[in-house]
Amino acid sequence: MTENQPLPPVTPDVLTVPRKDVAAGGKTNLVGLTRDGLRQALIAAGTPERQAKMRVGQIWQWIYHWGVRDFALMTNLAKDYRALLAAHFVIALPDVVSRQVSADGTRKYLVRIAGGHEVEVVYIPEEDRGTLCISSQVGCTLTCS
């Protein structure tokens, strides 16, 4: 390209790895959905639209505040609603493929994300804090050590 030619636009398709929302068994993974995406998924699964906003708040709190990964443990939801959730959704975290710990306490993880892609996560402990380095793309060329 020359100086006078504009760069091609940056589009979402070149910035992100396509999300594989449907897990094995045809269930949608709730982890990583936006609140609006969660609301839409709940409505599509049969949650009445007038209840969807409230249900998003409840489920969001269970997943992201309390770390619950089993719908059966979401005790402020009716049992039949928990069964509906379990029939349509999963709460699946990325798989840790490998772990390494160095003598200084640095921990490096290889994590498999949606679509089978793998990224590295490195935790570097420091005297008064820690640093967490998370690959922002698949195939990062930096060699964190």
Image (cartoon, rainbow, N blue to C red):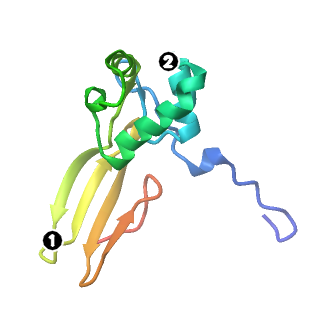
* Mark drawn on residue 102: 1
Numbered-mark total: 2
Q: In front here: 43 or 117?
A: 43
- Residue 87 is situated, as x and y percent measured from the top left of the image, at 36, 16
The relative height of residue 70 versus residue 134 in the rendered view (above or below) is above
* Mark drawn on residue 128: none
- Residue 59 is situated, as x and y percent measured from the top left of the image, at 41, 35
Residue 81's image quarter? top left
Residue farthest to the right, as pictured: 4
> What is the C-alpha distance between the residues marked 1 and 2?
46 Å
Quadrant, the N terminus: bottom right
Query: Of helix, strand and loop, which one carries label 1?
Result: loop
Which residue occupies 55% across, 22% down?
A: 43
Q: Is residue 105 left or right of residue 47?
A: left
Which residue occupies 31% across, 46% down?
A: 66
Query: Of helix, strand and loop, which one carries label 2?
Result: loop
The relative height of residue 46 versus residue 13 in the rendered view (above or below) is above
In the image, what residue type sits under mark 2? Ala
Identify the residue position indicated by label 2 in the image.
Answer: 45
Q: Does the rendering let one see residue 76?
A: yes
- Residue 32 is situated, as x and y percent measured from the top left of the image, at 46, 42
